[in-house]
Image (cartoon, rainbow, N blue to C red):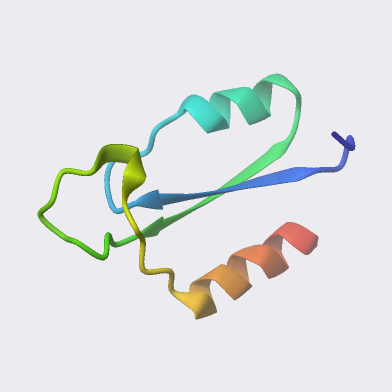
Amino acid sequence: MPENAKVLEINKNESPNLCYYSLASSINLEYFYQFCPSVCEGVDVDNNADLRVDIKKLRENVEAMLQ
């Protein structure tokens, strides 16, 4: 992975899972995250949820990553 690579985690609207942050941090990669609501709110689907991604917010996050 390139030294200047960055990580963007897209996750359900819940408390953050620090696993990917810890992995990125361990190899000195910048880490970003975006919380998104599950398409099937109220259904316990753990890490298999379909997410509704706010495209405007995603664009803002990607632009921040490119700076």
Viewer-proximal residue among 48 and 34: 48
Height in image: 16 above or below 19?
below
Q: Residue at x 48, y 26 (%)?
A: 19
Viewer-proximal residue among 32 and 54: 54
Q: Residue at x 76, y 28 (%)?
A: 28
The answer to whether 21 appears left or right of 39 in the picture is right
Viewer-proximal residue among 49 and 65: 49
Percent of width and height locating residue 56:
52, 80
Extreme residue toward the left, this view: 42
Percent of width and height locating residue 60:
60, 72
The answer to whether 6 appears left or right of 57 in the picture is right
Q: Residue at x 86, y 42 (%)?
A: 4
Height in image: 7 above or below 26?
below
Extreme residue toward the top, this view: 26
Q: Quadrant of residue 39?
A: bottom left
For the C terminus, which image quadrant? bottom right
Q: Residue at x 51, y 72 (%)?
A: 57
The answer to whether 21 appears left or right of 53 in the picture is right
Q: Quadrant of residue 7?
A: top right
Q: Quadrant of residue 23?
A: top right
The answer to whether 3 appears left or right of 55 in the picture is right
For the N terminus, which image quadrant? top right
